[in-house]
Image (spheres, grey):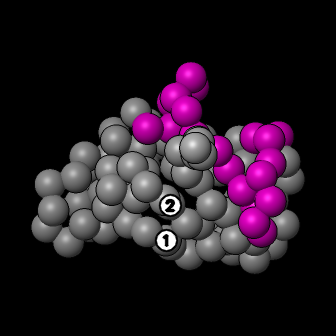
Amino acid sequence: MKLRVLYFARLRERFGVAEEALDFSGATAADLVAQLRSRGDVWAEELAAGKALRGDVWAEELAAGKAFRVAVNQSLVALDATLPEHAEVAIFPPVTGG
């Protein structure tokens, strides 16, 4: 399936990308996070077009216990949420207000 994946705040900065169109063969938000965690050095280098990004930044930022949220079509979801075809998936750090 096709997804539009958006990254915000520190994740956008660390990954070096704000959004991407992604071919996805999984079913849930957890499957998507696992796919993103597994990205390696070659992908990161090609995406960054010369920037010194490391693929392991994906595993580091999306590791179990690391604070981030997932929204599907602008609604917060749990990682077990099923992703529909052509969904917009946002991944971002938790936000606090004051």
Q: Residue at x 43, y 55 (%)?
A: 9
**Please, what secondary structure does the residue beneath circle 2 have?**
strand
Q: Position of residue 40 (x, y in %)?
A: 35, 47
For residue 73, above or below residue 12: below
Q: Position of residue 19 (x, y in %)?
A: 49, 71
Q: Quadrant of residue 72?
A: bottom right
Magenta span includes 27: no
What is the distance, in whole Å, between disc 2 and disc 1 at their CAs? 6 Å
Q: Residue at x 47, y 42 (%)?
A: 38
Q: Position of residue 12 (x, y in %)?
A: 40, 58
Task: Identify which residue, 88 or 42, lies in the foreground.
Answer: 88
Magenta span includes 78: yes
5 horizontally vs 72: left or right: left
Q: Residue at x 33, y 39 (%)?
A: 56
**Please, what secondary structure does the residue beneath circle 1 have?**
strand
Q: Is residue 28 visible?
A: no
Q: Main secondary structure of the magenta part?
A: loop
Task: Identify which residue, 91 or 58, lies in the foreground.
Answer: 91
Q: Is residue 70 visible?
A: yes
- List the residue tagged with mark 2: 7
- List the residue tagged with mark 1: 19
Q: Position of residue 16 (x, y in %)?
A: 31, 61
Q: Which residues are magenta?
A: 61-80
For badge 2, the amino acid type reads: Tyr
For residue 34, above or below residue 90: above
Q: Residues within 10 Å of mark 1 (few under 14, many from 20)?
A: some
* Cβ atoms at labels 2 and 1 below 8 Å apart: yes
Q: Earlier in the sequence, mark 2 or mark 1?
A: 2
Task: Identify which residue, 67 or 81, lies in the foreground.
Answer: 67
Quadrant of the image containing the C terminus: top right
